[in-house]
Amino acid sequence: MATLLIIHHTPSPALQALLEAVVDGARTDAIEGVEVRLEPALTCPETAVLAADGYLLGTPANLGYMSGALKHFFDRIYYPCLEATRRRPYGLYVHGNDDLTGAIRSVRTATTGLDWRPVAEVLESIGTPDRGTLDAAWELGATVAASLATPE
């Protein structure tokens, strides 16, 4: 069974709503053969990253950058996971109150360095997530999980 690891920093109600929608999408009954695990970015162990087959990253945009928690995650796992996780699929959602550009760019820089490959467009959420944004988060979770599912 494939494992999707959702690595998130969820300090606000808006990010909590996005996380829940992403998880619901990833765990939809329509996708079989994928176990979904969640780990906070600050405490996600390298062993969880190595054991996973794909990743879904969630972060707020803080001062034009990814959260410090997600940056700390990348700093800790970079060398221990660099060779073993090359070409693994990932998705990303980012929430903020205005410009998300720097946060998205910083995550892309880290994932490019790890040689992870995006399998979905970045979900950008500004302000309070509306129904359309939550539906897009559900789709993101389902898309990344489906990229790991074994064909019947």
Image (cartoon, helix red, strand yellow):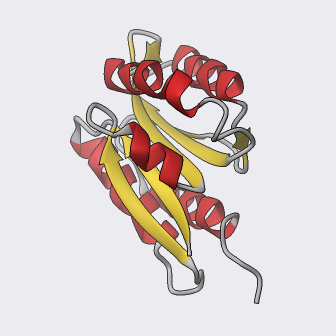
Left or right placement of residue 87 versus residue 134 in this view = right
Left or right placement of residue 143 versus residue 28 in this view = right
**Identity of the residue furthest to the bottom in this view:** 152
Image quarter for residue 75?
top left
Q: Residue at x 42, y 70 (%)?
A: 24
Left or right placement of residue 5 versus residue 30 in this view = left
Task: Give residue 145's position: percent from left, percent from top.
Answer: 59, 65
Image quarter in which the N terminus is found? bottom right
Left or right placement of residue 123 versus residue 42 in this view = right
**Identity of the residue furthest to the top in this view:** 63
| Placement of 115 over or under 39, stated as above or below | above
Task: Give residue 107's position: percent from left, percent from top.
Answer: 56, 24
Image quarter for residue 85?
top right
Task: Give residue 97's position: percent from left, percent from top.
Answer: 38, 25
Which is nearer the eye, 65 or 81?
A: 81
| Placement of 120 over or under 86, stated as above or below | below
Q: Residue at x 51, y 41 (%)?
A: 93
Residue 110 seen from this side = yes
Image quarter for residue 71?
top left
Q: How many callouts does the rendering have?
A: 0
Which is nearer the eye, 118 or 46?
A: 46
Which is nearer the eye, 22 or 79?
A: 79
Q: Residue at x 52, y 60 (%)?
A: 4
| Placement of 101 over or under 15, stated as above or below | above
Q: Residue at x 22, y 44 (%)?
A: 13
Image quarter in which the C terminus is found? bottom right
Residue 133 seen from this side = no
| Placement of 96 over or under 121, stated as above or below | above
